[in-house]
Image (cartoon, helix red, strand yellow):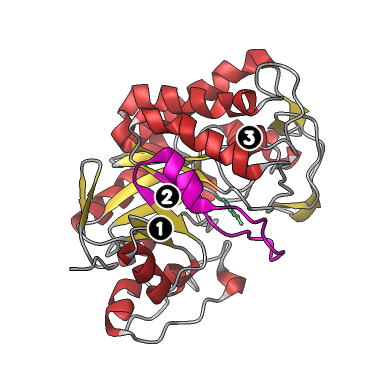
């Protein structure tokens, strides 16, 4: 029989009830960096998909880049996340937390006036969302080589905290123009030390982070997200296919839970011509595809074995019962962009079910 989105699958140690994944989405409803009861409700409503990947959670104070995003480093943050993970597990779903360091996609307002950090002192085009509204990005401070071990340690510690919070694993966010992606791509990494220049050097920090996190919690609890063609956050690379094939090859030996690719560019500009299946083949393990999938494309990708899992973002944001709607071929709610970031239950937990 042909597999569909509704076919169960075993990934790492998880018996997922279906092939649908909730893609990580920043929602800016965690004041003081703490998960709230409203967040518990939001995730519980969507805990019918097999695996939830939470919104990005900063791994340290230095990692912050947006208002009201949750953290996953302090014991208080762990205690609040525990209510989320317990509620998701009670519905029979699994949950990974996304480990996030924004790097240069931040603002001094979040750092007591200090500069955000990045591989190189290159100002991204665009503006930061601060508590006082949009402000131009600033030129970040290039991390010294001596500071890198402390960044790796922040990821390791966050992974340790994530397991204490009840998460089934962590997703290392190396996509969408944040710190690890800033190191990977040569538009944002002009370093001349062991962390810049060659593809091997630009991949070094990601591999050090992956090694530390896998040693801490076990590779089967670790997934990685990359966005090979995403120009969002002013990202560019001179040879993305070669770079991400290289990254996928380097990740292949860890025994990770999955590789998760954002297959589209979020800027609306025509995306570079990159072969995602080629990157996937270099990795060789479980593949989560994300970006622009509806039911028929998702089913087709699963049936053709082009992906093990399909991650849905905005459609699941607007349809907590997306799985049931797909089963019934029912119409979908229309997402309200105005309530994506910040605010209260409106556009968050009040989307109607069938
Ligand atoms: C966003 O806030 O728009 C955002 C955050 C994290 C991402 C992508 C987009 O990875």
Q: Identify the residue under disc 1.
A: 39
Q: Residue furthest top?
A: 146
Against 215, is 332 above or below? below
In which quadrant of the rendered image does the C terminus lie? bottom left
Residue 227 screen position, x and y as percent? 57, 49
User: Crowding near pointer 3: few (<14 within 10 Å), some, many (20+)?
Assistant: many
Return the x and y of residue 268 as percentages of the image width and height: 69, 66
Q: Nearer the viewer, residue 81 or 102?
A: 102
Q: Earlier in the sequence, mark 1 or mark 3?
A: 1
Alpha carbons under labels 1 and 3: distance apart: 32 Å
Q: Secondary structure at mark 2?
A: loop
Quick one: SS at disc 3? helix
Name the N-terminal-most of marks 3 and 2: 2
Q: Which residue is mark 2?
A: 35
- Do labels 1 and 3 touch, CB within 8 Å? no
Q: Which sits in the foreground, 51 or 65?
A: 51
Q: CA distance from mark 1 to mark 2?
A: 6 Å
Q: Are marks 1 and 2 in contact (CB under 8 Å)?
A: yes
User: Residue at image x 82%, y 36%?
Assistant: 139
- Image position of 103 (left or right of 31): right
Q: Position of residue 96 (x, y in %)?
A: 36, 45
Magenta stretch bounds: 259-287
Which residue matches tag 3? 184
Count neighbours of disc 1 (C-alpha within 10 A) and say few if under 14, some if 14 to 19, many if 20 or more: many
Answer above or below: position of 67 versus 292.
above
Location of residue 294 with respect to 179 vertically, above or below: below
Query: For residue 108, which quarter of the picture?
Result: top right
Query: Would residue 156 be counted in the magenta stretch?
Result: no
């Amino acid at each position: 029989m042909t597999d569909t989105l509704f076919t169960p699958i075993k990934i790492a140690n998880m018996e997922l009830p279906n092939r649908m994944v909730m893609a990580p989405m920043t929602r800016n409803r965690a004041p003081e960096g703490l998960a709230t009861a409203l967040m518990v409700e939001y995730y519980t409503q969507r805990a019918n998909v097999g695996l939830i990947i939470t919104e990005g959670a900063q791994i340290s104070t230095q990692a912050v880049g947006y208002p009201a995003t949750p953290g996953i480093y302090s014991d208080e943050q762990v205690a609040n996340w525990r209510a989320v993970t317990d509620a998701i597990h009670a519905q029979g779903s699994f949950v990974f937390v996304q480990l996030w360091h924004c790097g240069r996609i931040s603002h001094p307002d979040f750092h007591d006036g200090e500069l955000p950090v990045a591989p190189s002192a290159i100002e991204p085009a665009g503006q930061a969302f601060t508590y006082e509204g949009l402000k131009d990005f600033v030129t970040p401070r290039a991390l010294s080589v001596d500071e890198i071990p402390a960044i790796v340690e922040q990821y390791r510690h966050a992974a340790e905290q994530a397991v204490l919070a009840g998460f089934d694993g962590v997703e290392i966010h190396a996509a969408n123009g944040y710190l690890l992606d800033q190191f990977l791509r040569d538009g944002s990494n002009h370093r001349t030390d062991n962390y810049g220049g060659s593809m091997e050097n630009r991949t070094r920090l990601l591999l050090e982070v992956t090694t530390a996190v896998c040693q801490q919690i076990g590779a089967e609890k670790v997934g990685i997200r990359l966005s090979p063609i995403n120009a969002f956050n002013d990202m560019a690379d001179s040879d993305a296919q070669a770079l991400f094939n290289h990254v996928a090859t380097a990740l292949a030996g860890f025994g990770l839970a999955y590789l998760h690719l954002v297959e589209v560019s979020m800027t609306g500009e025509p995306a570079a011509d990159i072969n995602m299946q080629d990157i996937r083949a270099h990795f060789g393990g479980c593949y989560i595809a994300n970006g622009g999938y509806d039911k028929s494309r998702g089913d087709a990708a699963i049936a053709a074995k082009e992906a093990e899992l399909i991650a849905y973002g905005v459609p699941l944001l607007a349809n907590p019962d997306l799985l049931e709607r797909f089963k019934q071929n029912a119409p979908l709610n229309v997402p309200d962009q105005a309530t994506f970031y910040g605010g209260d239950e409106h556009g968050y937990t009040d989307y109607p079910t069938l």
